Image (spheres, rainbow, N blue to C red):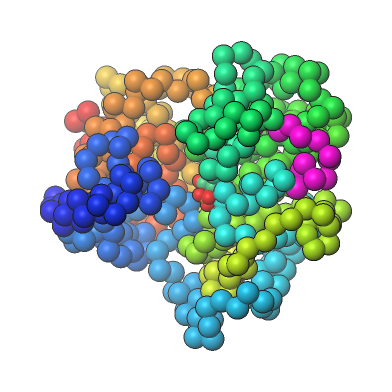
């Protein structure tokens, strides 16, 4: 496999950007080696500057549920772009995308478009505080909610602890209202509410935690979070930046049939362009400026080209009645076949839901908390990663990241992927 041109470009990029990249995981630090510089994508495949071809299961970290350069998205975005790229004034395209989403989602009535998942979650937290008049938030170890200050926290040593900032540059005062709890533990949540219940504005969770492995939660646990937040008049925020429109059009909320108070979106909603959103009931959204006292704004919010791409992508997801069943079926085939190949001398398991999968080197039947993951097992992922690359399979470059199957992965892609795994797992 030639990587000469990627290497050259990476050396140059290091002169311009911290670590040579504009988002840390892209630097290949977890797996070692040089990141591949991508030249183009078409359908299920990506091609790097050295002209290697890969079947792509990273899918730009989730947005590309229809694969790369999907004609309906490209055509609509291009058509809209001919009339200008941004106005900072309302366009019909915002109405169209909002209508498409709200009319197909039973749990939300109003939405606000922003430009990233981080911005969506940051605004949702502000909204929860504005609506409840309370300050504290509960988040869970192992859930990622973007890089806003209040959420860059890790757990302290006890069961119920205020977070310690997990990044330099975040003052302790900024995270003093963030409680960090382990997932899958009702007692910890009860204890937190008993101690601080009067001041807890919201519990935020990725209902399908997919940023630190795939930590599939029990439905009863999510239902418990719904009822305890109601009991204490706190809000429940589902961060559906990954799961939204991915495990079904109505995301995890629809999948588990649990109505959270606020839902955040990102990734798929923008069809490969930078879009995020937060949505809730009319009453809660009534807090948002200019209707209400909570300020939140954005120069490029609701950008017409991004709205067009999002509209085109979500329309396709709704167009085919079996869209999500087919995606899931494809994923289950892939996962089950690979699972059966399991290397005899190594623990190996693939967790999956909808079209999301996560490869773990573990014997555990369930992995529901961040602490269930053995960091030492990542050495196997690292080895496997490079062997897969050499054989034309591209995953996100970290063993803590999930993979995504897209609608355009063909049967041939799936068969080829299984064949490559067979070869690679044997040689681990
Ligand atoms: C669940 C979740 N929330 C928030 C974010 C942040 O989104 P963005 O990277 O668009 O800022 C991510 C990104 O991966 C995410 O997975």
Observer-nearest of 127 and 254: 127
Q: At 58% from the left edge and 39% from the top edge, which residue is drawn?
A: 149
Residue 295: name its quadrant.
bottom right
Task: Report whether 61 appears left or right of 46.
Answer: right
Q: Residue at x 34, y 20 (%)?
A: 376
Q: Residue at x 35, y 53 (%)?
A: 56
Visible residue check, residue 329: no
Residue placed furthest toward the top: 158
Examine the rendering and report whether any part of residue 345 can be seen: yes
| Camera-nearest residue between 75 and 94 | 94
Residue 235 place in picture, x, y as percent: 78, 39
Q: Position of residue 158 (x, y in %)?
A: 61, 13
Answer with left or right where residue 382 lies relative to residue 101.
left
Q: Front-most of 308 and 319?
A: 308
Check residue 353 for magenta coloring. no
Relative side of 175 to 132, left or right: left
Specify whether residue 135 is painted magenta. Answer: yes
Q: Position of residue 418 (x, y in %)?
A: 31, 43
Q: Position of residue 195 (x, y in %)?
A: 79, 18
Q: Which residues are magenta?
A: 127-140
Residue 273 position (above or below residue 221): below
Q: Give the vertical position of 111 relative to 395 (above or below).
A: below
Q: Quadrant of residue 139?
A: top right
- For image coordinates 53% across by 43% down, the residue present is 147
Q: 238 or 134: which is nearer to us?
A: 134
């Amino acid at each position: 496999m030639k990587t000469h041109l990627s290497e050259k470009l990476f050396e140059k990029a290091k002169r311009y950007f911290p670590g040579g990249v504009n988002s840390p995981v892209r630097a290949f630090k977890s797996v070692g080696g040089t990141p591949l510089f991508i030249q183009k994508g078409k359908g299920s495949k990506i091609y790097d500057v050295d002209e290697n071809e890969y079947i792509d299961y990273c899918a730009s970290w989730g947005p590309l549920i229809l694969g790369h350069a999907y004609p309906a998205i490209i055509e609509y975005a291009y058509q809209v772009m001919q009339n200008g790229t941004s106005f900072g004034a309302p366009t019909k395209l915002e109405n169209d995308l909002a209508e498409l989403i709200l009319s197909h989602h039973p749990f939300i009535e109003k939405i606000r478009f922003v430009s990233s998942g981080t911005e969506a979650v940051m605004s949702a937290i502000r909204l929860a505080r504005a609506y409840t008049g309370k300050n504290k938030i509960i988040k869970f170890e192992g859930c990622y909610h973007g890089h806003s200050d209040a959420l860059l926290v890790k757990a302290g040593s006890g069961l119920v602890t205020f977070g310690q900032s997990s990044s330099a540059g975040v003052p302790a005062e900024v995270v003093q209202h963030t409680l960090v709890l382990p997932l899958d533990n009702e007692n910890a949540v009860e204890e937190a509410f008993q101690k601080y219940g009067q001041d807890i504005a919201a519990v935020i969770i990725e209902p399908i935690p997919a940023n630190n492995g795939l930590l599939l939660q029990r439905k009863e646990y999510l239902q418990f979070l719904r009822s305890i937040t109601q009991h204490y008049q706190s809000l429940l925020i589902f961060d559906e930046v990954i799961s939204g429109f991915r495990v079904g059009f109505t995301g995890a909320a629809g999948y588990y049939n649990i109505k959270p108070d606020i839902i955040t979106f990102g990734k798929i909603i923008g069809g490969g362009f930078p879009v995020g959103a937060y949505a809730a009931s009319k009453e809660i959204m009534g807090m948002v400026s200019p209707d209400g006292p909570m300020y939140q704004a954005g120069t490029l919010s609701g950008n017409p080209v991004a709205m067009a791409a999002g509209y085109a992508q979500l329309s396709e997801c709704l167009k085919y009645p079996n869209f999500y069943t087919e995606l899931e079926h494809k994923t289950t085939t892939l996962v089950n076949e690979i699972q059966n190949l399991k290397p005899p001398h190594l623990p190996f398991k693939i967790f999956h839901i909808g079209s999301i999968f996560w490869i773990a080197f573990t014997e555990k039947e369930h992995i529901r908390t961040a602490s269930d993951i053995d960091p030492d097992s990542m050495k196997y992922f690292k080895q496997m990663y490079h062997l897969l690359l050499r054989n034309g399979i591209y995953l996100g470059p970290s063993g803590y990241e999930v993979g995504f199957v897209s609608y355009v992965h063909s049967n041939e892609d799936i068969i080829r992927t299984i064949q490559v795994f067979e070869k690679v797992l044997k040689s681990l």
